[in-house]
Amino acid sequence: MKYLYEKFTSPADQSLTIRTEILEMKETDIFKCHANFKIVLLENCIGKRFIGDHIDDFEGPELVLLGRYLPHYWQYSGVHDSNLLPMASVVHFSPDFLGKELLEKPEAKELSDLLCAAARGIVFTGDTIGHARFILQQMLREKGFGRMAWMAQLLNVLMRSGNHKVLSSPYFNLEETSVDGQKINKVFDYIYKNFRNEITLREVAAIVPMSSNAFCRFFKQKTNKTLSDTIKEVRITHAAKLILAGMYNVSEACYNSGYNNLSNFNKHFKELKGLSPRNFIKKYKGPGLKVEASNNVMQY
């Protein structure tokens, strides 16, 4: 997996930005993350969404709210209407764009809850998309306080939407500002760089540094995951990407993701993805893909 940290600098006279862009139909495997919240509306496109450890197909329109530091990217594979361009409307904003004390107000509890949930990524469906589309169009026409007012309305629409789903596991989003957050980031950075190899509790605990027992308590408290579960999820997420890329069979994806036992790999894959590798291929690569089994190794 590749990760790209994007650093946005807003103009001095703006606390949020909005833009539209034409989507490029090209493959990518680079997770992006940044310190801003992000609202994305994708129109007239088909593809796959990758948010944290979440992978799924989508058919536009697609409306998603992303929290700070949440790794994400989309792969675009086609359009609904060949006479129209595939487009994206993108808003970047900080949680305090309406004032640093806003989220502490009792009236802003719903907004605070929404932004907390955004740490895992939220996809919205139904009438929410139409309401959001209209507001985004107004925001593109406005500047200054008028744009901020429309932004507040957009957040209100998202807060009150009953048509939404949280996407990723919580540990994939980590604030970088706190001391504990920096420790956790060091651990995840080590895992991402070394998950193809054997990783021991002792060597990871030494990064922080802590004793093994203290580290286990600390890591579980901060991520709600054990270290072994986290490593397993990183490996399986990587393996799923290799399989979807079409360049590796299941056995090769297994051994290129840190496993040395195909049986354990298949067990963990089904545990986390809800499907065996074979059925995962059938669901996400379509019926045209040829899948053959020989000596417990699938070829495609």
Image (cartoon, rainbow, N blue to C red):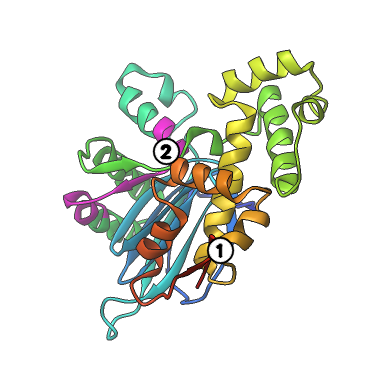
Q: Which residue is drawn at 64% across and 15% down?
A: 217
Secondary structure, mark 2, is helix
Residue 182, percent across and down? 71, 30
Q: Main secondary structure of the magenta part?
A: helix
Q: Residue at x 58, y 32 (%)?
A: 229
Toward the viewer: 190 or 3? 190
Toward the viewer: 280 or 95? 280
Residue placed under numbered mark 2 in the picture: 118
Residue 67, percent across and down? 48, 41
Q: Which residue lies furthest to the bottom in this view?
A: 83
* Left or right of residue 189: residue 131: left
Q: Can residue 207 be seen in this view?
A: yes
Residue 41, percent across and down? 35, 59
Instruction: Using the rendered view, name the quadrant where residue 208 is placed.
Output: top right
Dot 2, how many residues are within 10 Å of its Cα: few (below 14), some (14-19), or many (20+)? many
Residue 201, percent across and down? 74, 27
Residue placed under numbered mark 1 in the picture: 295
Which quarter shows the N terminus?
A: bottom right
295 vs 258: above or below: below
* Left or right of residue 193: residue 181: left
Dot 1, how many residues are within 10 Å of its Cα: few (below 14), some (14-19), or many (20+)? few
Q: Is residue 22 visible?
A: no
Q: Nearer the viewer, mark 2 or mark 1?
A: 1
Secondary structure, mark 1, is loop
Label 2, label 1: how far apart the Cα atoms are: 44 Å
Q: Residue at x 59, y 21 (%)?
A: 220
Instruction: Using the rendered view, name the quadrant where residue 274 is placed.
Output: top left
What span is colored magenta in the figure? 115-132
